[in-house]
């Protein structure tokens, strides 16, 4: 029977249940030595969370944040893929654009917040611009890597089958780059989530970042925790969802 | 020189530029002259590193020559061309993993925007020819090594290449599959009358397949030592005294070339 016990324990560690239990235990213990304003315990947090779930605020904020992310991220992807493909394909384009990219990729999106507020206004546009910016670089850089990594043999196949350079670009370069592009898109999403939270903390009246930031003013530390939890969970699940789509729709292109 | 040569190689030489500061330039091929008749099954036989792939890559148009001429159908070649279909050794890299067998075979025809009914008919015929019927809708990762090579062969034939260039196409296959594929190639060659350029380092494979065998000397400055003709019906038996004699003769060339 010790084997069965071992198996059950392994199942629990594998599914992350042990990790979760451990986390709750530490949290609960730490909360016992502190006031709820400083560190609420898990149950208090859950109760606080229930309040903003019931009155719809939480879902509303999640929805708002993710709409911003979705719009900005989609625009970013649509801008970045062609740019990455062109840079990867043409030496001239690379020589012109690469210095820009290697400069701005080290400037985080949030560094542009004040400028974007000035240029695009305090409404949605500035937040979306932040997300576009955060998405564009990982997608461009990975797309370039995809084009660079194409096996010479595939290009030779297309050439000896009579394909023109433009046909080779469409029928070989683009599909062969798909797994890299997809990696860029995933990284872009995590970058977008990080950036939107920061932007919402500093310059928004709604969203998960706003929730985390303003709850402090009402001494609702439990809501801060709920905000963080929501952020982690929604990020985790959106990436899972994205990977699921990648694996099913793009499996043939080598997306794993 | 033969009049009906589909490929004429004249004084072909290839020197690779030095790779680094301490590297010397490397003359790999030196003054290759050869005529290949239309419909020939021509094997290039040479030891590893002698320059066989370099030669085929130049004929395929992937690699630039240093001097000399390669004339295909009366015209000097400029880069790759549809009349020269290539079957690569590395089938995994040479078939598009995102397309089915059917789509892979169809590739060249689509590129040319051939109308669908015509296209379907050709693809069907070529897939049947290489024995891949009932596998049309499979993806490359569902195929064995031998089947992948069949896809490559079908693709070149579908695209109406007159010449098939094959660089050790069965090097990665096990002995049984290899023999099967060798018979398949002979079969296809007899049915289609394509001109086949086939590279190998295996004397037995050369004698089993080739109607002409060009023996390549050692690197550097490799050239064709001799081109011998093997007139024996297919399928061949290598223990047949005449073929065994040819194998011994070729072995003799290599022994003196490499001073064994
Ligand atoms: N791009 C290159 N630059 C410099 N040297 C090269 C290059 N390609 C091949 N060579 C050299 O040319 C020689 C012949 O190479 P090649 O690949 O044609 O030989 P091979 O006969 O096909 O060998 P194998 O049987 O191993 O495939 C080798 O010495 C190799 O190092
Ligand atoms: Mg080789």
Image: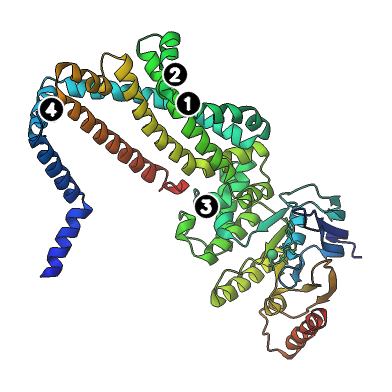
How far apart marks 1 and 2 lie (CA) works out to 8 Å
Give the structural element (helix, strand or loop) at label 4: helix
How far apart marks 3 and 2 lie (CA) works out to 50 Å
Residue A188, located in which quarter of the rendered image?
A: top left
Q: Is residue A67 above or below residue A88?
A: above
Q: Residues within 10 Å of mark 4 (few under 14, many from 20)?
A: many
Frontmost of labels 1 and 4 is 1
Looking at the picture, how far across and down is residue B113, in whole percent? 62, 40
How far apart marks 1 and 4 lie (CA) works out to 35 Å
According to the picture, the residue beneath numbered tag 2 turns out to be A112
Query: Which residue is farthest bottom?
Result: B241
Residues marked 3 and 4, same chain = no
Q: Which mark is residue A107?
A: 1
Q: Are marks 1 and 4 in contact (CB under 8 Å)?
A: no
Q: Residues within 10 Å of mark 1 (few under 14, many from 20)?
A: few
Q: Residues within 10 Å of mark 2 (few under 14, many from 20)?
A: some
Q: Nearer the viewer, residue B77 or A55?
A: A55
Q: Are marks 1 and 2 in contact (CB under 8 Å)?
A: yes
């Amino acid at each position: 029977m010790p084997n069965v016990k071992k198996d059950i324990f392994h199942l629990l560690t594998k599914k992350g249940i042990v990790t979760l239990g451990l986390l709750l235990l530490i949290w609960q213990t730490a909360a016992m030595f502190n006031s709820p304003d400083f560190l609420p315990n898990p149950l208090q947090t859950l109760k606080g969370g229930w309040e903003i779930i019931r009155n719809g605020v939480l879902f509303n904020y999640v929805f708002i944040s993710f709409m911003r992310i979705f719009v900005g991220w989609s625009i970013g992807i649509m801008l970045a893929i062609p740019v990455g493909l062109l840079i990867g394909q043409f030496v001239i384009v690379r020589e012109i654009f690469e210095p820009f990219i290697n400069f701005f990729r080290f400037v985080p999106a949030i560094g542009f917040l004040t400028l974007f507020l000035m240029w695009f206004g305090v409404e949605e546009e500035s937040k979306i611009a932040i997300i576009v910016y955060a998405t564009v670089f990982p997608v461009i850089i990975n797309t370039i890597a995809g084009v660079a990594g194409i096996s010479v043999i595939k290009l030779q196949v297309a050439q000896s089958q009579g394909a023109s350079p433009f046909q080779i670009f469409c029928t070989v370069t683009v599909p062969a780059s798909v797994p890299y592009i997809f990696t860029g898109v995933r990284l872009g999403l995590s970058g977008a989530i990080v950036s939107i939270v920061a932007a919402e903390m500093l310059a928004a009246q709604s969203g998960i970042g706003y929730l985390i930031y303003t709850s402090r003013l009402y001494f609702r530390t439990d809501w801060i925790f709920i905000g963080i939890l929501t952020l982690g969970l929604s990020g985790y699940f959106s990436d899972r969802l994205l990977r699921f789509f990648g694996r099913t729709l793009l499996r043939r292109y080598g997306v794993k | 020189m033969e009049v009906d040569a589909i490929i004429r190689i004249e004084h072909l030489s290839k020197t690779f530029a030095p790779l680094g500061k301490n590297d010397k330039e490397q003359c790999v091929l030196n003054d290759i002259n050869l005529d290949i008749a239309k419909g020939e099954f021509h094997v290039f036989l040479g030891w590893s590193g002698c320059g066989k792939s370099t030669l085929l890559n130049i004929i395929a148009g992937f690699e630039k020559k240093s001097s000399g001429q390669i004339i295909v159908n009366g015209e000097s070649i400029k880069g790759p061309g549809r009349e020269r279909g290539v079957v690569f050794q590395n089938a995994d890299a040479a078939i598009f993993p995102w397309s089915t067998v059917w789509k892979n075979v169809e590739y060249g025809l689509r590129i040319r925007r051939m109308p669908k009914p015509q296209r379907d008919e050709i693809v069907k015929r070529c897939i049947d020819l290489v024995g891949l019927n009932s596998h049309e809708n499979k993806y490359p990762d569902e195929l064995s090594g031998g089947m992948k090579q069949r896809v490559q062969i079908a693709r070149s034939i579908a695209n109406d290449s007159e010449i098939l260039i094959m660089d050790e196409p069965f090097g990665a296959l096990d002995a049984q599959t290899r023999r099967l594929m060798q018979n398949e190639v002979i079969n296809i060659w007899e049915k289609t009358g394509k001109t086949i350029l086939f590279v190998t380092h295996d004397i037995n494979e050369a004698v089993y397949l080739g109607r002409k065998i060009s023996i390549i000397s050692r690197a550097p400055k490799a050239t064709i030592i001799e081109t011998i003709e093997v007139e024996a019906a297919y399928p061949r038996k290598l223990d047949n005294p005449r073929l065994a004699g040819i194998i011994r003769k070729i072995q003799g060339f290599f022994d003196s070339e490499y001073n064994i």
